[in-house]
Amino acid sequence: MPPTNKIVTIGSHSALQILKGAKDEGFGTIVVCVKGTEEPYRSFKVADTIISINSYNDFEKIQDQLVKEKAILIPHASFIAYMGFERVEHLKIPYFGNKKILRYEADRNLQRVWLKNSGINVPHIFKDYRDIDRSAIIKFHGAKGGLGYFIAKNPHDFKKKMKGYQKDQRYVIQEYIVGVPVYAHYFYSPLTDELEILSFDKRYESNVDSLGRISARDQLALANVDPSYVIIGNMPLVVRESLLPKLFEIGRNVVEESKKFASPGLFGPFSLEMIIRPDMEIVVFEISARIVAGTNPYVFGSPYSWLRYNEPMSTGRRIAREIKRALQTKQTHKILY
Amino acid sequence: MPPTNKIVTIGSHSALQILKGAKDEGFGTIVVCVKGTEEPYRSFKVADTIISINSYNDFEKIQDQLVKEKAILIPHASFIAYMGFERVEHLKIPYFGNKKILRYEADRNLQRVWLKNSGINVPHIFKDYRDIDRSAIIKFHGAKGGLGYFIAKNPHDFKKKMKGYQKDQRYVIQEYIVGVPVYAHYFYSPLTDELEILSFDKRYESNVDSLGRISARDQLALANVDPSYVIIGNMPLVVRESLLPKLFEIGRNVVEESKKFASPGLFGPFSLEMIIRPDMEIVVFEISARIVAGTNPYVFGSPYSWLRYNEPMSTGRRIAREIKRALQTKQTHKILY
Amino acid sequence: MPPTNKIVTIGSHSALQILKGAKDEGFGTIVVCVKGTEEPYRSFKVADTIISINSYNDFEKIQDQLVKEKAILIPHASFIAYMGFERVEHLKIPYFGNKKILRYEADRNLQRVWLKNSGINVPHIFKDYRDIDRSAIIKFHGAKGGLGYFIAKNPHDFKKKMKGYQKDQRYVIQEYIVGVPVYAHYFYSPLTDELEILSFDKRYESNVDSLGRISARDQLALANVDPSYVIIGNMPLVVRESLLPKLFEIGRNVVEESKKFASPGLFGPFSLEMIIRPDMEIVVFEISARIVAGTNPYVFGSPYSWLRYNEPMSTGRRIAREIKRALQTKQTHKILY
């Protein structure tokens, strides 16, 4: 018997996958689109209903309609970024996820404490530019989508490069770790207390992923190019199998730690964003406490989800299955907020 | 009832996928191979019949045989490159695609007009080297497979580097856009007037995709390395979901524009080759008006084709399905030329 | 009727895929884990039995138990690296593969002779540093997992950089080929004398695959970064279709050549690790005479294995199928040693 609830999400980020996964689990689907962005959801045939709004400001206006449809909201990063976490906290539509986590995720400092208390390596933060004693990356606060970074090797270099930026901008000076970026996609079920690894990806970022295609000679000849990390896409990746035990361990630690400060803790999909160094040390620089777009290559399942499920299991579908299971076993209070 | 027609293509480029897709739709398959290149088509079991010829010059000699077999020809880039578009225009075997498009695709200037009239950003062209006022890439005409490029930052740099090349070679001086390359794979059906996005890829090019693996210090120490863009392979990619509405729009514009100058316009598979900049502006530098090899990672479907089809749908299979549908509905005059 | 034998491997490298493939072919599965590394095999549900040992030193202690279970051992690189090939040669448990190949694979010089006698291009080796007349990469013997390399352009550069290393370390000076790395995954069946190409990958190595993400200017500003090639993961890749005939040919040559010196020769999965240059010349720098971790992206089949099999066929499953076929046709003496 298919569920009578519907799944709703916002047309962006990972909505295609979320909606497809919901349909595969038997849910009706609704996508809310800002006017002009409907075509993908029409063409890929994943939404039973498309609701157009003028801007994210109007989301609350359609909330009653969604509640009446018995819709359950799946949040993603674009939704939270455009709404702001305070507004999300006040929504009354059933929401998949622990809203208490939102403010921890939104604050770099709280994230850092969370990771450190989980026993995980994080990059060093320099409190003062004069302390820079190894290569560092300077990240401006509120930098949207990967713009506004530079790399400095020492205090002098910092001062010189800082001249190009406004004085009143807030920033953080973080140790620059040389190693490859890896994005690990987890799912934690509060219904079964199981932690799963669903997949991995490597981001495809403009311009940093094109710099290497310009020879050093030509780069130096060209006008100076500052690195930017604007995500344009994602590429599938598997990781060295001997790293998996450690990756399960740190995923579990992040979940357990979160139970202490935001009961019942982090659940559903989340991602750890890390650098893996040549000595195979893992340094985590960010937690995403919801579905990440890096799972989009795996609409039809990942090399990892095929192992466990033996059927096409995307992160979007895994969410829908969790909700279905909670509905069937009357445990929705554990996953909807 | 399976179709009584057969699908034929040339053994190279994307033939494996085309033949597999044809078989999946119930067609018999024929591959025409230059002697010595048959093994992949044998080993992968995608061709019912392998016809060996000594060289592409002999293609017309087997045409009668193919016509008798009721074969429909699926062109790809290698076929057109080796045959030359004038010869292709004069073939009498049923041909999937609009032959009028061929000469627009073959001419960089006509392509450029096509793209501009479609309202799409294209890289600036410098008519004279003395006008170079930002980084530029110099592409020689008739450059085969990605060799014969260099990057110059100003007129002086251009003159210096030009010394290594023959004076009588024709070239184009194009603005060098810093951003990541993305290849978008479309399919337009003249039977339903629907435009689909089937997949995306990132090319894997020798040597540019290895330059980044050499440290700047070592690159400068080594003998000078000119960039080359010889395609060696392709890697799967998904793009940021919020870019999709724009990508649907520009794909549609390219199709509509083509109807004006080469009625009934571009149809079937095509690709737009683009750079996406850090500000998320899309700059298109080339149209491929047929199947591209970038669809080869998706023999069993792509993250996008799984959304719409819920069965393994490669571009090769999509072609075969279009032909089958046209045969079943007596509309082959709309797709075969 | 499912086979009564079981498949056993060591919990690392490509064990998830091997065990999943074995289950798909109907075998019972056993994984042997060093204590503390069991979680992936539990979570991904691929092992019927998990046996924990304190270290690889204890492997022989559980051998009798494995033999009693009618287990067949599938070796992989981690198993051979940790056990040492001499110990593997003396194991009594049925072993999938030709043990005579092990010492050829372990010795760079023997590998080189093997490749050259197969008519395959290999990188030039400089016997004396004073002979360095083009860019060269210096690889230290016993370098574990990709550490301990540098690039030198001439004898002077070599001497200068060599100062950072211990004098008594053995090394090889190899021509540095500029081109893209490609890893080709083969399977040769001694039951049918067929050579298959199952897939390709591109490694994801720390730190070389992150160097390109640092601008040349910033790289030079940072402290010197030596390249390291520690494998962190693998990414899916397809190759230009016109390269396949040559790739089938060199795979076949490697198999045929091995029959001369290690009868009945190399069989089962193997990999050729190559650079493909801009002129499309293939230079092979290593043979892996067993399953490689580069096949891990293809748990649910690769674009190539879907062509031939039309069902999900990983390299792990291909191994299990070969064993099943040998059991069914009483030819296990051809594949178990």
Image (cartoon, coloured by chain):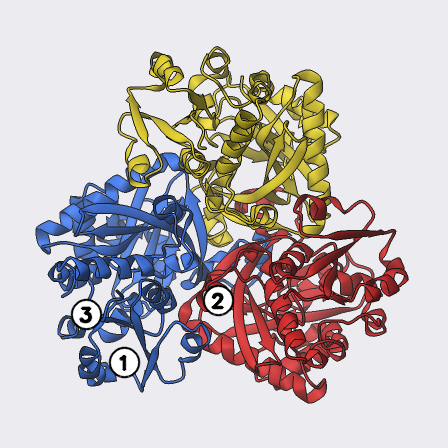
Chain colours: A red, B yellow, C blue
Residue located beneath label 2 in the image: A309
A79 sits left or right of A205 in the view: right
Would residue C287 be seen by someone viewing this image from the given angle? Answer: no
Where in the figure is residue A298, as x and y percent of width and height? Answer: 55, 57
Secondary structure under tag 3 reads: helix
Q: Is residue C300 above or below residue C91?
A: above
Which of discs 1 and 2 lies nearer the camera? The answer is: 2
Where in the figure is residue B139, as x and y percent of width and height? Answer: 55, 28
Q: Is residue C67 above or below residue C125?
A: below
Q: Which mark is residue C85?
A: 3
Task: Find the residue positioned furthest to the bottom.
Answer: A260
Q: Residues at marks 1 and 2, common chain?
A: no
- What residue type is disc 1 on? Tyr
Q: Which mark is residue C56?
A: 1
Cα distance, mark 1 to mark 3? 13 Å
**Residue pictured at 64% horizontal, 25% vertical:** B129
Q: Residues at marks 1 and 3, common chain?
A: yes
Q: Residues at marks 2 and 3, common chain?
A: no
Q: Which of A304/C220 is in front?
A: A304
Q: Which of A138/C60 is in front?
A: C60
Q: Which of B179/B12 is in front?
A: B12
Secondary structure under tag 2 reads: helix
| Label 3 crowd (10 A; few <14 / some 14-19 / many >=20) | some
